[in-house]
Image (cartoon, rainbow, N blue to C red):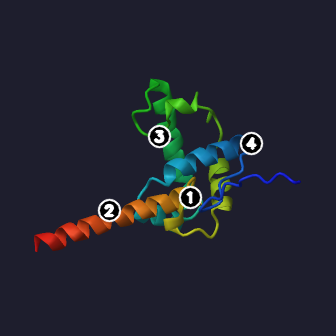
Amino acid sequence: MPKTANRIQYCVPPIWVQDHASQCAAHFLNWFRTNSTAHIKDVLRCGLKGSGGLVEEVEHWLHNCSEDAENGEGDGGYWEPSYGPWTGGRLPALDIAKVVWSHTRGWKAEEFELYGQTIQQRSEYVEIMSRWQADLNNHSVSRA
């Protein structure tokens, strides 16, 4: 009898890490998704190499990751020490940005928030938020 594995289903496809650039791209996307939808839209609107675009955003992230790694505390919020030592090294931001650009082609800004989340995690989150909103609405109605 064939063994069936439980496949993890993601809301948006994760990057398949094959090399150093894709490893950094995956870490970048994990951070980038935490930005506001408005900021992500602005970056996407500027394109890959335009002023304010993805290459500049990756450069900003690389610089701040290096600073977090140097102080070893991750207090800047860019590089979590539990990830291990910083491996960005001298990898050009353009190489990382190209991987991100290629992988996310066609994504809407709102979809970046979903990066790394499984469908099950998202469903649980939506359920909790729905209950929370219903509790707020019930509380507001009872006060009126």
Left or right of 142? Residue 115 is right
Give the residue type that dot 4 points to: Asp
Q: Earlier in the sequence, mark 1 or mark 4?
A: 4
Mark 2 to mark 1 CA distance (whole Å)? 18 Å
Taking 51 as reference, is 72 above or below it?
above
Q: Residue furthest left?
A: 144
Give the residue type that dot 2 points to: Trp
**Counting other residues with Cα less than 10 Å from the Cα at mark 1, is it few (<14), some (14-19), or many (20 or more)?**
few
Q: Do the CB atoms of the residues marked 4 and 3 lie less than 8 Å apart?
A: no
* Residue pointed to by mark 3: 78
Q: Residue furthest right?
A: 1
Q: Residue visible at 49% across and 66% down?
A: 110
Q: Nearer the viewer, mark 4 or mark 2?
A: 2
Q: Earlier in the sequence, mark 4 or mark 2?
A: 4
* Residue pointed to by mark 2: 132
**Counting other residues with Cα less than 10 Å from the Cα at mark 3, is it few (<14), some (14-19), or many (20 or more)?**
many
Taking 25 as reference, is 88 above or below it?
above
Q: Nearer the viewer, mark 1 or mark 4?
A: 1
Give the residue type that dot 3 points to: Tyr
Q: Which mark is residue 19?
A: 4
Q: Pinpoint residue 79: horizontal percent, then vertical percent.
A: 50, 36
Q: Residue visible at 61% across and 62% down?
A: 12
Q: Which secondary structure, mark 4? A: loop
Q: Is residue 113 visible?
A: no
Q: Nearer the viewer, mark 2 or mark 3?
A: 2
Give the residue type that dot 1 points to: Gln
Q: Viewer-proximal residue, 134 or 109?
A: 134
